[in-house]
Image (cartoon, rainbow, N blue to C red):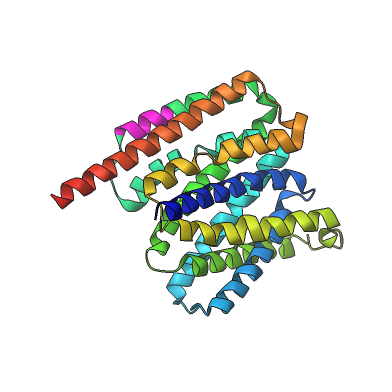
Amino acid sequence: MRNDKLLNYLHLHFIIFIWGFTAVLGALISLEAIPLVWYRMLLATLIIFAFLKFKKEKLNFSFKTLSGFALGGVIIALHWLTFFGAIKASNVSVTLAVLSTGAFFASILEPLIYGRKVILYEVLFGLVVVAGLYVIFDVEASYTLGIVLALISAFLSALFSVINGKFVLKHKASAISFYELMFGVLGITIYLAFSGSFTADFFKVSAYDWMYLLILASVCTAYAFIASVHVMKWISPYTVMLSINMEPVYGIILALIILGDSENMSPQFYYGALIILITVVANGIIKITQERKRRRLSNL
């Protein structure tokens, strides 16, 4: 039993390591953000569709449910567009550091969408995160566009997570993922068609880019999503919450190793990133501790 738990824990960190590697792949792929996301979502949709057919999963949903999936698909597409746009405009380290603010956007959005009251410590933590962002802005002014895009991406990621939280309670994650990816790529396709962007150059993709895109779509998108759902059935929410906060750490370390000098930042940048990361971890610890207390009291 103990070995099974250890294997699932190691599997979780492997998945988080893969998520961190996503940003590095975004930097390695020479395509701009829009074609990059279009190819990623299209390939991932086809891979997950094949998986669902193999597993004989149900894909019939009501129009209302499909409309919700369509909204989620548009949001995740915009999240990835701004995410990879931020990497292209700055670098992996800046993007991942700023993306850590997603947990606090979720803290703001949850009361609005779920109708719960605002929690004071979340507001205070939010102010600390703003201080960390100020440090990064102050020393990395040349990356302003990348920082702004990463902030928008973090907000969209939080919005997607909050909305998706309702879907997961009723439907299988693999089916949700398939429809959201499909609607996301459909939305980008409509935009590209009306803007006249489907030119011969759009479909000119180098062999290296195809290799990275296939890894991004299969390993970092289809596999990582489905595997993460499986692992989270066996590991406590506390462990999952704290482990996921390692994603920017893994990503920044990988970027320094693989991309080299382009990822070397000033000491002040790492101070600001550390402030954000510590605050996010502290927020996670408090949330899980309070949840455990509530469960103990309800069992009395």
Residue 24's place in the image compared with 165, above or below, is: above
Q: Residue 80: percent from the left, percent from the top? A: 62, 51
**138 in the magenta segment:** no
Q: Is residue 46 above or below residue 237?
A: below
Magenta-drawn segment: 120-127
Q: Is residue 184 visible?
A: yes
Name the one closer to the observer, 58 or 249: 249
Relative image position of residue 277 (x, y in whole percent): 50, 32
Residue 118 shows in the view: no
**As drawn, which residue projects farthest toward the left?**
300
The one of 176 and 258 positioned closer to us in this rendering: 258
Quadrant (top left/top right/bottom left/bottom right) for the N terminus: bottom left
Q: Main secondary structure of the magenta part?
A: helix
In the figure, 63 relative to 97: above or below?
below
| Residue 220 percent across, percent down from the top left | 63, 55
Q: Residue at x 22, y 49 (%)?
A: 295
